[in-house]
Image (tube, helix red, strand yellow):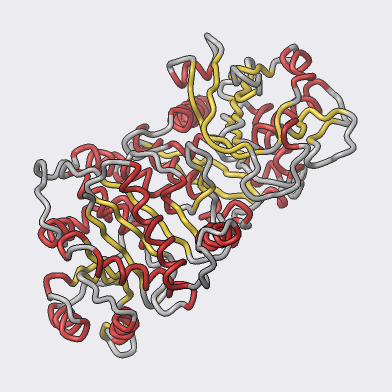
Amino acid sequence: MSKFIFITGGVTSSLGKGIISASLAKLLQARGFSVTIQKFDPYINVDPGTLNPYEHGECYVTDDGAETDLDLGHYERFLNISTSQANNVTTGRIYQTVINKERQGAYLGKTVQIIPHITDEIKRRIKLLEQEGAYDIIITELGGTVGDIESLPYLESLRQMRRELRNKDCMVIHLTLIPYLKAAGEHKTKPTQHSVKELMMAGIIPDVLVCRTESKLSDEIKAKLALFCNVDKNHVIEAIDADTIYRVPLFMQEEKLDQIVIDRLKLEPKHSPNLDRWTEFLDRYKNPKTEVNIVLVGKYNELADAYKSIYESFVHAGAVNECKVNIIPIHSENLDESTLPLEIHNIHGLLVAPGFGDRGINGKIGAIKYVREKGVPFFGICLGMQCCVVEHFRNVIGIDDVSSVEVDPDTRHPVIDLMPEQKKISAKGGTMRLGAYACEIKKESLAEQIYGRNIIHERHRHRYEFNNAYLQQMESHGLIASGINPETELVEIVEREDHPFFIGVQFHPELKSRVEEPHPIFVAFVDAAVKYKNAKEVVAAL
């Protein structure tokens, strides 16, 4: 039987429940436990697939094709595991399931209500992971904050589960904020007291308080929190701001959060904590021997979370190369022929990010032309790959009326076209090509050098693809399709033969990069940027 840990939040959003959940899971995993994490989001959307990145950050995609919250990326990066549809559930999906059952007559004419029907479905989803895998511990992160109207059904479900499960099989960790008022010169506990009061009004007493703070908490503050929030003083955990999210597990270990959980749930660790690979990664990350500037050209650069997995992939790849990667975000709409040399002249690599629609396309294509001609390392992801194909046909082959159907539905040369199975689809949610698919890599290609094998599986999220009617023409002018889906013949990877490092991929490699297993394309791209920088410095010194 699995043990259940619930993580709730109070006072304010964006405190880092996902990072605390992943950090605790990492510590428990390091002691030999089998751990997984799930996220319950209180919004009515069925999934975040139709949300604008400005609304909710990036949409993370799993191997089985689930469009999920970005916190699942943290779970996978920290634990080096793959999640699934069962790891992310929204209120929209809960209500959709219940309403569908009602339409089918599953409730035998009963009045369908929040309690018990919605709460029963929430509890069923919580326990689903227990049925799917033999996990010692299941951590459930409840999105939103205590006191939100939309969070009430989840808190009621949690109250019921605490009642149904034996006390030693379930516990609640409440993450809250301890603000510091500069004028008063002291930390304030009242927001946390009110947050816990709201939780207790829902029938839930937290077992542990994790207090997010910018500075150290005194013993007096911890004692006050313990007294007014009805928790043991030793269970008041300080979560001080960290210079990197990857240091949080070590901070939580210092606060003995994992030991508190082990004692509270009567667990027997399989071995002493083993975080050797984690600390080795941190050491390499914090002590780089060189640094490079990589421009990220995208259309959502105002919000870093829109490209969260890309940023984290550079952290992982930078550590492998003992290199600090300075990411310079540039909005593609701001790039034109006059601004390009000024914006991206002193760079060592260019990544064109994924996205949808026609906004900023010409800026992306112009940036690709610049780095192709200058020999600067290039990496394009999804739309970034499609843009480099369009640039190739326009500026290398010399065909002007070339475009993607997504950008220009009336183009005479649709080198990027809507996938055949997508042409009959009108619904937007969950209808793209989603999840992991196979790719066969050509021998003696750059892609083969990077991966070291000829069959790979990568995650996808797109509707448009390279039009194979133009394949021979593209390859005859130096842009090679080096990765092909063996079943559909979909072009997955393109690369230039006449360039030091130029690669575009239709899939999303950033979704499979881990702290302990950095993605090979990002590792190779950073390595190429370092080599390009070193070569420039040699030339400048002559």
Q: Quadrant of residue 105?
A: bottom right
Q: Nearer the viewer, residue 526 or 21?
A: 21
Percent from the top left, x then y, of residue 341?
Answer: 68, 41
Q: Is residue 326 above or below residue 518?
A: below
> Image point 50% across, 43% down: which residue?
310
Position of residue 396 in the picture relative to residue 326 (left or right): right
Q: Nearer the viewer, residue 185 or 381?
A: 381
Percent from the top left, x then y, of residue 109?
Answer: 54, 67
Q: Nearer the viewer, residue 214 or 482?
A: 482
> Image point 34% across, 53% down: which residue?
127
> In this view of the protein, can residue 541 be seen by the observer?
no
Percent from the top left, x then y, of residue 26?
Answer: 25, 48
> In this view of the protein, can residue 279 be seen by the observer?
yes
Q: Nearer the viewer, residue 532 or 325?
A: 325
Seen from this angle, which residue lies furthest top? 444
> Image point 24% across, 76% down: which residue?
205
Q: Quadrant of residue 296?
A: top right
Position of residue 237 in the picture relative to residue 523 (left or right): left
Q: Is residue 276 above or below residue 236?
A: above
Q: Is residue 62 above or below residue 215?
A: above
